Image: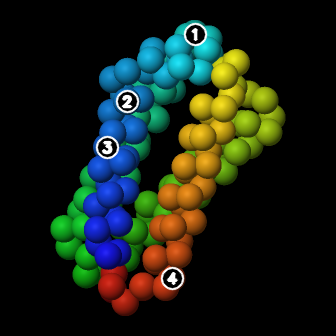
Amino acid sequence: MIRLSILFLSIFSLMYGIYFLFLPYSFVNLTAAESINIAWLRNLGGAITGLLFIGLFMIYLNTKGSIRLLNVIIITSIIQTSALIYSRIANEFSAKNLIIIDITIYAAIVVTVYLCFISIRFKNLFI
């Protein structure tokens, strides 16, 4: 079940990352944001695709001995989620449709908490 959830998160990360990487203007339109700097969305898409998709997929393929990679993914997820939360509180988003931003933040929180949970509760699977 844990491995299947990791595969699900990996595929979800692939879709999310590809969306930001190749369709950033779509996200800008969806959130009614300014399209001044699309580069940060593409960069985020690359990071999500590279780290979360590939990293989680590698863990799915070979769970044993993957605790270090899982920890890197968790730390990165905590940092990214914290940055999103800070930016939302500081009103740094140009988006007018903030519900989409909020949904993104809630999704990031759920993924981060879940990854922390499985790394603690099921640590033996990854050692």
The type of colouring in the image is: rainbow
| Residue carrying label 2 | 19
Q: Tell me if I can see residue 59 in this picture.
A: no
126 relative position to 33: left or right: left
Q: CA distance from mark 4 to mark 2?
A: 31 Å
Residue 3 vs 106, above or below: the answer is below
Q: CA distance from mark 1 to mark 3?
A: 25 Å
Label 2 near label 4: C-beta < 8 Å? no
Disc on res. 36: 1
| Residue carrying label 4 | 120
Instruction: Mark 3: give few (<14), some (14-19) or many (20+) Cα within 10 Å.
Output: many
Q: Earlier in the sequence, mark 2 or mark 3?
A: 3
What residue is drawn where x is 57% and y is 65%?
Answer: 113
Q: Three-letter amino acid code at disc 4? A: Ile
68 relative position to 116: left or right: left
Q: Earlier in the sequence, mark 4 or mark 2?
A: 2
| Residue carrying label 3 | 14
Looking at the picture, tell me which residue is in the foreground, 79 or 8.
8
Please state which of the two labelled residues, at mark 4 or mark 1, is closer to the viewer: 4
Q: Three-letter amino acid code at disc 3? A: Leu
Q: CA distance from mark 4 to mark 1?
A: 41 Å
Assign a secondary structure to mark 2: helix
